[in-house]
Image (cartoon, coloured by chain):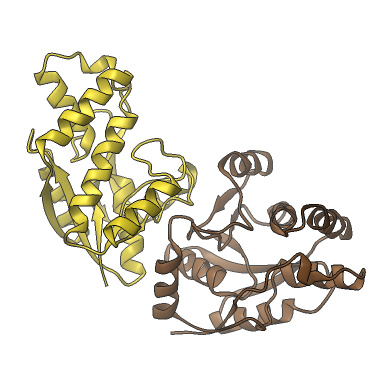
Chain colours: A brown, B yellow
Amino acid sequence: MEAAVLYSGGKDCSLAAYILDKLGYEVRLVTATFGICDSFKYAKEAADAMGFDHETKKLKRDIIEEATERIILDGFPRNGINIVHRHAIEEVAGQFCTIADGTRRDDKAPWLNLPEIRSLEDRLGIEYISPLRGIGYKTVKKLVSDLLIIEEGVDINKGDYEVELREFLRKKGYDVKEHFLVHKQSRLLEMR
Amino acid sequence: MEAAVLYSGGKDCSLAAYILDKLGYEVRLVTATFGICDSFKYAKEAADAMGFDHETKKLKRDIIEEATERIILDGFPRNGINIVHRHAIEEVAGQFCTIADGTRRDDKAPWLNLPEIRSLEDRLGIEYISPLRGIGYKTVKKLVSDLLIIEEGVDINKGDYEVELREFLRKKGYDVKEHFLVHKQSRLLEMR
């Protein structure tokens, strides 16, 4: 059984991949990218450290147009990030039947609600798994520290949607500090 | 790290226990019982088959009174089952700091919503984990068939709340068929 894990190189999707591996899935890490910058290479490094296959999946430019328009309109990135995430799942669904991500119980974005999940599963004929959806922040932190070696900080490079969304907006002349909060990032260095 | 898994012997809580074990927890299976019938013995048998420690936790009679009153009032068991589940977590919280259950993404009961989970965690100082909360019915079915050997049917004996709630109502002269739907039960026989 193959499972694609949408992968940024961060701690959450790394832990999700770890769990799927333990459940017997052949894990394939997939980083969605618009090709705006080369941040996917950080995801690739982390994927290599996990010892799982890794590939990138190119998303169409009109998706980042739609997502960033939404972010400008909202003044916050949540809905824009979700637009990218849904499209990434759709894109990966052409190749994989089981698709997972690192969404945690306490996450705001990316976050699919139950009707959205069921609709995606039915429409695309996939099984969607979020192994961390029933696990809170504190527990994820403990598990990560037990199982993985990560680096954390506000200026860690990883291959998530936000990096490219920020860069795209910056190039268009927007002040991204207005729309994105600065928060701690993480990146997998090694498995314990 | 010890984790108590609320355990009926069924497939979902068995799979949840399997995942926690793979995450490095010392798994303790705990079956809550009112002592109305001896259905906990089926959970004990399944626990032995999993090779994890098992214990029963006695719940107070006023909880089953409250839960069955609610079921009679509602005409369906969901809220009554949730009352028992919350009390079971509270009871187990006296002994364990990490408490898990087999709640699946598509479950109706027992089911704690996010505010209820956060309130329980803060008030009791516990971490609550539902390893299957991000996994749909179809995927759980596949994983169970890959990892566990179970028996399934409408008349399988296991140690869940519903067995005792039904029996309590039956003894009080209620027609339980009016309040509970007949649905397929499962019980773990062996690990693969």
Residue at x 92% of width, y 68% of height? A172
Q: In the rendered picture of this protein, how many numbered marks are placed on residues?
A: 0
Which quadrant would residue A183 be assigned to in this image? bottom right
Tell me: A34 left or right of B154. right
**Can residue B187 be spotted in the picture?**
no
* Residue sitting farthest toward the right: A172
The image quadrant of residue A19 is bottom left
Left/right placement of residue A124 relative to residue B183 reads right
- In the image, residue A89 lies at what x, y percent? 68, 54
Side of A75 relative to A2 (left or right)? right
Furthest residue in direction front, as rendered: A178
Residue B17: x %, y % from top left: 30, 58
Work out whether residue A159 or residue B149 is closer to the camera in this orientation and state it: A159
A69 sits to left or right of B112 = right
- Residue located 30% across and 23% down the image: B182
Task: Quadrant for the C terminus of chain B, please.
Answer: bottom left
User: In the picture shown, does residue A16 fall above or below A86?
Assistant: below
Depicted B25 relative to depicted A119: above or below: below
A129 or A132: which is nearer to us?
A: A132
State the image coordinates of residue A160 (x, y, percent, origin top left).
69, 70
Q: In the rendered image, which quarter contains the N terminus of chain B?
A: bottom left
- Front-most of residues A132 and B62: B62
Q: Is residue A140 visible?
A: yes
Q: Name which residue lies at 84% across and 53% down.
A: A66
Q: Is residue B1 above or below residue A116?
A: below
Where does residue A164 sit, x and y in percent of width and height? 79, 70
